[in-house]
Amino acid sequence: MGYLVKHIVSSLLLTVLFCLSLPSVYCAERAIPAGKLGETVVLGREISLNTAAHTLSKQYTGNVLNCSSCHLKNGTDLKNLTYVGVAAAYPAFSSRENAVVTLADRIAFCFMRSMNGLQPPPDSTLVTAIAAYITWLSEGTAIKMNPVEPNGPNAMRRLNVNPNTVDLVNGKKVYDAQCASCHAEDGQGVKTIQFPDASPGGCPPLWGANSYNKGAGMYKLQTAASFIKSSMPYAAANLSEKDAIDVAAYVNSKDRPDFDLKKHLLKSAPHAKVAD
């Protein structure tokens, strides 16, 4: 009986902590749906958190990153690349694809680029589960399709970036002082239970074969700098815009996999919307 009480209390505490990470409007809607739909939402949450190792997703990944490596707190962090509200923006126009894309399309694209893997079929159980989790976190958000870019209403604030003013020497200095303790001097990440949102049990690699490829959104200087500014160092973001831009440029100056579209497509997968 004592174990049961402890389990119930622990579950309630986790629910409260999860709720506190969201706007109050979402707290009343945190209940998992009943039946198969609820099972699919939970499956999507698990895949997003442990993408590189999950049995349904690992065959489509080409590095050790998880969805939660970039979508912090498994997509519930409103400051940065959140899932909350995203489903309400789709279908949306994507300039990269020069086409209108669905949420399922966007998830599949991430596997090819951020995960440096293969495009999973958009109608697969894998993609459906992740889409269900994102849609669950978007409940209560007014539907407003995005005709400009595939971003939701809580999209990350973008910094104004001038590539001509980047200082890689300062970027390395910032990296050594602020980033290396978690991501390692060689950029290959550090496994630690202190940071459970990133690669399995730790902080993800930022360059090299196990990181995102040159087709990923994070390889864009503006995206990487904006992400770093709002979220890094983890749980204690304190960099100036200049330092965030310089360290993003430094990270992206390092070796990483190229992006060759043909190598990331499954022969059986539809890819009419995919762009180089």
Image (cartoon, grey):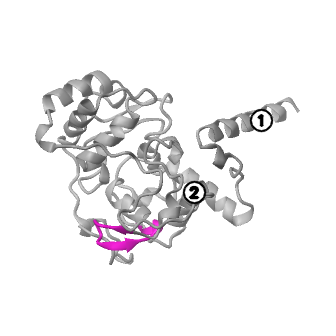
Q: Is residue 54 magenta?
A: no
Question: Of residues 260 and 133, which is closer to you in this image?
Answer: 133
Furthest residue toward right: 1
Among numbered discs 2 and 1, the one appearing first in the sequence: 1
Q: Left or right: 243 with respect to 80?
A: left
Callout 2 amino acid: Ser
Q: Residue at x 43, y 41 (%)?
A: 199
Position of residue 184 measured from the top left corner of the image (x, y, whole percent): 31, 28
Give the residue at mark 2. 138
At mark 1, the secondary structure is helix
Q: Quadrant of the N terminus?
A: top right
Q: Which residues are magenta?
A: 93-105
Give the residue at mark 1. 7
Q: Quadrant of the C terminus?
A: bottom left
Q: Left or right: 117 with respect to 161?
A: right
Q: Left or right: 15 with respect to 114?
A: right
Q: Is residue 102 magenta?
A: yes
Q: Left or right: 70 with respect to 4?
A: left
Q: Residue at x 79, y 37 (%)?
A: 8
Against 273, residue 48 (above or below) is above
- Give the CA distance from mark 2 to mark 1: 28 Å
Quadrant of the image occupied by residue 80? top left
Against 121, residue 74 (above or below) is above
Question: Of residues 240 and 128, which is closer to you in this image?
Answer: 240
Position of residue 249 measured from the top left corner of the image (x, y, whole percent): 20, 39
